[in-house]
């Protein structure tokens, strides 16, 4: 079974084309492939392209714990680059169907940079109800955090802090992700405002854990910062893995632009994945 591996600012994904599979991936297969000691290792699997009735392509996204993600910003950039590498797209805009909605994508800079229209950001996790930005408080390990909900096709919990480091995401991220108030768990972003056009974030990704970069997390964090009046419409999001640019219009439609790097191609051994 052939695979390709890419990363978007250190957030790495394995692309598996369904045409190269004899059977569907099992939960065990997904966990093994993503495991960094027993498999190739990655922050998730991009399963596609599949046919779509409404878009040019369809994509499924799996987390390392085998749960399925609705949307991934870095994953979509990587998948777009994969389509470009396979000569399935040119530098023209094309559409991708995900469980978190339809996105428009454009590959630029000879594949090294991709822009994705992430859709309109809503400040709620619910499909119904008024999507207003509302401060809420969560108590974790006797510490109170003020947080804001955001929805980029997948759920986010955005927390603004004056000081930021990776240890806070690693200490509190999993506890917040799995808190009972989040019915479908949540991605978590800890955010520090740098200036009107820059923020810094540390990320705990639902189903994946501590992550060096995330496109949907960047979109959620930037949208909350703009909605609070702390940033303008063009925001550079600084993460341990690098910088993603988020542009927001007056309706909070977000366009994300960031780098993509191809790592390798290969074949999985039947010995490692006997079910395949």
Image: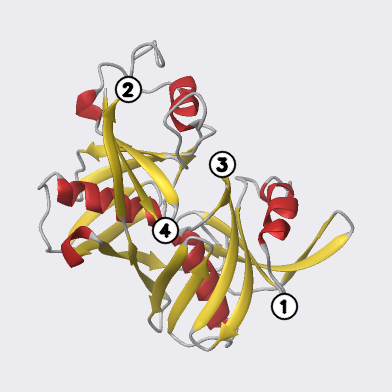
User: Which residue is rendered at x = 51% and y = 30% of the image?
Assistant: 35
Q: Is residue 33 above or below residue 52?
A: above
User: What residue would you read off at disc 4?
Assistant: 9
User: What residue would you read off at disc 2?
Assistant: 268
User: Which residue is rendered at x = 23% and y = 47% of the image?
Assistant: 82
Which of these two is toward me, 102 or 210?
210
On the rendered image, what quadrant is the N terminus found in? Answer: top left
Horizontally, residue 162 falls left or right of residue 227, namely: right
On the rendered image, what quadrant is the C terminus found in? Answer: top left
User: What residue would you read off at disc 3?
Assistant: 207
Which of these two is toward me, 134 or 201?
201
Q: Is residue 230 above or below residue 209?
A: below
Disc 4 element: loop
Question: Which one is earlier in the sequence, the residue at label 4 or at label 2?
Answer: 4
User: What residue would you read off at disc 1?
Assistant: 162
Question: Which one is earlier in the sequence, the residue at label 3 or at label 2?
Answer: 3
Image position, residue 209 (x, y; %): 60, 45
How far apart marks 2 and 1 lie (CA) works out to 45 Å
Q: Nearer the viewer, mark 3 or mark 2?
A: 2
Question: Which one is earlier in the sequence, the residue at label 1 or at label 4?
Answer: 4
Disc 2 crowd rating (10 Å Cα; few below 14, some 14-19, many 20+) is: some
Question: Which one is earlier in the sequence, the residue at label 4 or at label 3?
Answer: 4
How far apart marks 1 and 3 lie (CA) works out to 27 Å
Image position, residue 71 (x, y; %): 42, 51
């Amino acid at each position: 079974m052939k695979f390709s591996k890419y990363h978007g600012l250190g957030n790495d994904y394995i692309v598996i084309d369904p045409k190269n599979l004899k059977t569907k991936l099992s939960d065990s297969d997904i966990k093994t492939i993503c495991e960094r000691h027993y498999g190739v290792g990655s922050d998730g699997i991009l399963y596609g392209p599949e046919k779509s009735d409404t878009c040019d392509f369809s994509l499924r996204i799996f987390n390392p714990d085998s749960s399925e993600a609705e949307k991934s910003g870095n994953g979509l950039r990587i998948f777009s680059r994969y389509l470009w590498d396979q000569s399935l797209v040119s530098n023209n805009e094309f559409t991708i169907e995900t469980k978190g909605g339809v996105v428009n994508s454009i590959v630029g800079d000879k594949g090294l940079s991709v822009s994705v229209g992430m859709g309109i950001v809503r400040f709620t996790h619910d499909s119904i109800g008024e999507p207003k930005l509302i401060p809420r408080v969560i108590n974790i390990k006797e510490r109170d955090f003020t947080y804001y909900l955001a929805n980029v096709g997948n759920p986010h919990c955005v927390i603004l802090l004056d000081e930021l480091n990776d240890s806070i995401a690693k200490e509190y991220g999993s506890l917040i992700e799995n808190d009972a108030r989040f019915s479908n768990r949540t991605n978590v972003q800890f955010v520090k405002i740098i200036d009107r056009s820059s923020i810094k974030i540390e990320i705990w990704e639902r189903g994946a854990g501590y992550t060096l970069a995330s496109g949907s997390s960047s979109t959620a964090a930037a949208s909350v910062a703009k909605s609070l009046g702390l940033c303008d419409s063009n925001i550079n999001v600084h993460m341990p893995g690098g910088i993603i640019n988020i542009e927001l219009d007056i309706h909070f439609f977000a366009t994300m632009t960031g780098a993509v790097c191809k790592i390798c191609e290969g074949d999985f051994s039947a010995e490692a994945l006997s079910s395949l």
